[in-house]
Image: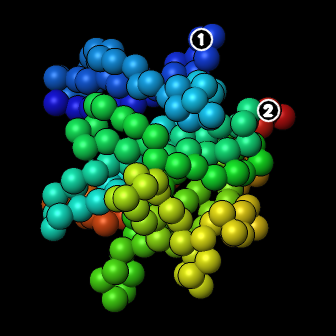
């Protein structure tokens, strides 16, 4: 079957896990993801879940990561899960009004894997997500060795994006049979008003 995640808006924004057993024609809500640990032990508004492999053993993912945007808190967060159903806090960083924070693993020419973090499909930074097994926290290290916490939002560069494009959703093609295998696709929506 298929597994999906979306944000629902109510008294507070929550992430919901959904599943489909018919190829995506119908979906069933399965459970909410508790985020009460995101901000000082209290729940915070957060949205736009982006799922990515955090740790791998060969081709098998042993720990999944989720990035969440918290515009009202000027932060983005990471969650972690071994089974894609039970999630727990794994750190986060400051960013002025983040939207649609997405993490894309990319393979360099030398075979090493690095990560791109994009925000609103307008800004991005490249580095390495490193999971510290002792603290249970995700760190993001820039190519020059500095931690994102030391550099902050200045680590992000501006993308070349179309006028009025905003809030992109992205995904990786990991099907070896696809002609787009290994590619990352991002699709933005347009918030402009037509003339």
Residue visible at 60% across and 25% down?
42
At mark 2, the secondary structure is loop
47 is higher (above) or lower (below) than 115: above
Query: Residue 53 appears at what percent x and percent y?
Result: 32, 55
Circle on res. 87: none
User: Dot 2 surroundings within 10 Å: few (below 14), some, or many (20 or more)?
Assistant: few
The quadrant of the picture occupied by the N terminus is: top left
The secondary structure type at the circle numbered 1 is loop
Q: Residue 79: x and y, percent?
A: 44, 42
Q: Residue at x 46, y 47 (%)?
A: 90
Is 124 left or right of 158, judged from the image as shown?
left
Whole-angstrom CA distance, mark 1 to mark 2, is 27 Å
Q: Residue at horizontal 39%, vertical 30%?
A: 5
Residue furthest front in the image: 134
In percent of width and height, residue 148 lies at 63, 66
Identify the residue position indicated by label 1 in the image. Answer: 10
Residue closest to the far top? 11
> Residue 166's x, y, as percent?
67, 44
Q: Residue at x 35, y 25 (%)?
A: 17
Q: Is residue 15 left or right of residue 174?
A: right
Q: Is residue 170 among what the camera can see?
A: no
Q: Is residue 18 above or below residue 125?
A: above
Q: Quadrant of the C terminus?
A: top right
Identify the colour scheme used. rainbow
Which residue is under mark 2? 193
Lower position in the chain sequence, tag 1 or tag 2: 1
């Amino acid at each position: 079957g298929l597994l999906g995640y979306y944000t629902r808006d109510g008294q507070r924004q929550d992430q919901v896990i959904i599943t489909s057993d018919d190829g995506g024609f119908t979906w069933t809500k399965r459970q909410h993801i508790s985020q009460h640990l995101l901000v000082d032990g209290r729940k915070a508004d957060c949205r736009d879940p982006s799922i990515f492999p955090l740790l791998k053993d060969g081709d098998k993912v042993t720990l999944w990561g989720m990035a969440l945007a918290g515009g009202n808190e000027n932060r983005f967060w990471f969650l972690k899960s071994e089974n894609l159903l039970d999630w727990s806090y794994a750190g986060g960083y400051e960013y002025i009004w983040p939207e649609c924070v997405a993490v894309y693993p990319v393979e360099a020419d030398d075979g090493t894997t690095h990560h791109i973090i994009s925000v609103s499909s307008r800004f991005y930074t490249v580095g390495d997500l490193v999971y510290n097994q002792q603290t249970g926290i995700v760190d993001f290290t820039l190519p020059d060795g500095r931690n994102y916490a030391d550099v902050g939002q200045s680590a992000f560069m501006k993308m070349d994006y179309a006028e009025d494009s905003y809030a992109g959703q992205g995904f990786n093609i990991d099907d070896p049979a696809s002609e787009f295998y290994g590619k990352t696709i991002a699709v933005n929506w347009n918030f402009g008003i037509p003339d």
